[in-house]
Image: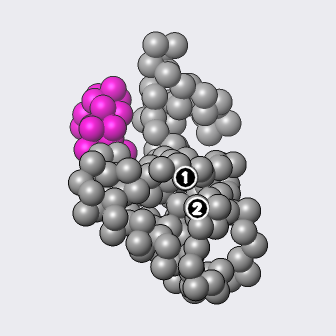
Amino acid sequence: MESGLAPWMRIDALKSFIYSAFQFPIRTSHFAKKHWDAIDKALRKGIKQTLSLPERASNDYLYGHRKYGCYAISILSEECELNRIDSAFKLLTSKDSRISTMAFEHLSSVVKARMRKSSVTDEDLEAYLSSTFNDNDNAYSNTWTCARIASSRLGVYWQFED
């Protein structure tokens, strides 16, 4: 966060270039939430130094909405969770029927394997993505497991309808 730019220019550059560069790894679940928390913490410290704010200053000033005079900085760890759910939803509801069919088939195969069933119902898919199905361990990470974990943390309930 050190440069010859004015403080407002540094914040603007951070939001325009750095945060937009994070979108792909956030959306594709490249890192765990704890890593995004660490990045948030480092960025928060740098932003507060740029704005000449003490470390103990409220974070609401950084993360609040612009219409209230705040900077509207994204919280990457929260955005990570929302994007994981959003990515799964967009795959399942894609306008391209090939994409939505492939996504549904992949989700079904994951749920079959995790629940150890030969076929799954919509209720099984709902239970899996909503984390109401008790799953002991999963060594594999994919779009559906990431969406499931994010849904559990945020209290999101999935519902499938024809």
Q: Position of residue 21 (x, y in %)?
A: 28, 52
Q: State the residue in front, 13 or 116.
A: 116
**Relative height, residue 95 to residue 109 (above, below):** above
Q: Is residue 114 visible?
A: yes
**Relative height, residue 117 to residue 153 (above, below):** below
Q: Which residues are magenta?
A: 1-18
69 left or right of 114 in image: left
| Disc assigned to residue 122 | 2
Give the distance between the C-alpha atoms of the residues marked 1 and 2, in whole angstroms.
6 Å
Q: Main secondary structure of the magenta part?
A: helix
**Residue 96 sits in which quadrant?**
bottom left
Q: Residue under circle 1?
A: 160
**Relative height, residue 46 to residue 32 (above, below):** above
- SS at badge 2: helix
154 left or right of 61 in image: right
**Relative height, residue 129 to residue 10 (above, below):** below
